[in-house]
Image: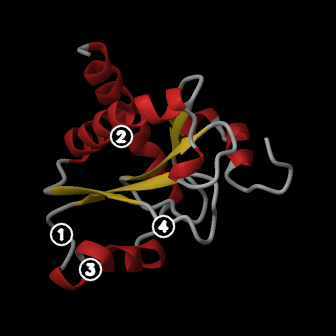
Amino acid sequence: MESNCLICGLDDADPSDVVFRDDDWSAEVVPGYDVPGWYFLRARRHAERITGLDDRETATFGRRASDLVAAVTHATGAEATYLLAFGEAFPHFHVLVTARTADVPADRRAGEILKLRDERADRERARELVPAVRKAYADIAARQ
């Protein structure tokens, strides 16, 4: 773990924020992005950008991402679930999975959904969704 990496520090997240965690990947509600239905999927090892992933992380990323998107979609009833990656503010490899529910207006869809980060932040409601997403994820992953 890089001592100055905010994303690495998420390994100390409150267990009530965690959807799943395995040797390579973790998914959780993250402070500052705690909109209900939003989760970071991140490499547990400090890897900068997708090009910094090792072979095992690269091989498992697609399955973890697909299962998490399916779980978030199922648990939230989202009409769309986005998988976003930038890597500039926090170069530690992670993606933001965002549920886009029917009540999200047209001017807050696609890339504009990030404006909801401030408009809809609600840590308690975000945490309340974790058990349903965790169960959906476990059910989906068990079928693989």
| Left or right for 39, reference 47 | left
Per the model, the C-alpha gap separating discs 1 and 4 is 25 Å
Residue marked by disc 2: 65
| x 26%, y 16%: residue | 144
Labelled disc at residue 86 = 4
Q: Image point 53% across, 33% down: which residue? A: 25
Marks 3 and 4 sit apart, C-alpha to C-alpha, by: 18 Å
Determine which of the numbered discs, if any, sits on residue 108 in the image.
3
Q: Residue at x 51, y 26 (%)?
A: 56
Amino acid type indicated by mark 3: Arg
First in residue order: circle 1 vs circle 2? 2
Q: Nearer the viewer, mark 1 or mark 4?
A: 4
Residue 99: x, y in percent? 28, 56
From what the image shows, is residue 69 above or below residue 63?
below
Q: Quadrant of residue 75?
A: top left
Q: Residue furthest bottom?
A: 107
CA neighbours of label 2 inside 10 A, class few (<14), some (14 to 19), many (20+): some
**Mark 2–mark 4 contact, CB under 8 Å?**
no
Between discs 1 and 4, the one toward the N terminus:
4
Colour style of the rendered protein structure: secondary structure
Mark 1 in CB contact with mark 2 (< 8 angstroms): no
- Between tags 3 and 1, which lies in front? 3
**Residue 138 vs residue 13: left or right?**
left
Q: Is residue 31 left or right of residue 107?
A: right
Whether residues under marks 1 and 4 lie with C-beta atoms below 8 angstroms apart, the answer is no
Mark 3 packing: few (<14 Cα in 10 Å), some, or many (20+)? some
Q: Quadrant of residue 120?
A: bottom left
Q: In the structure shown, which secondary structural element does the residue marked by tag 2 occupy?
A: helix
Mark 1 highlights which residue? Answer: 103
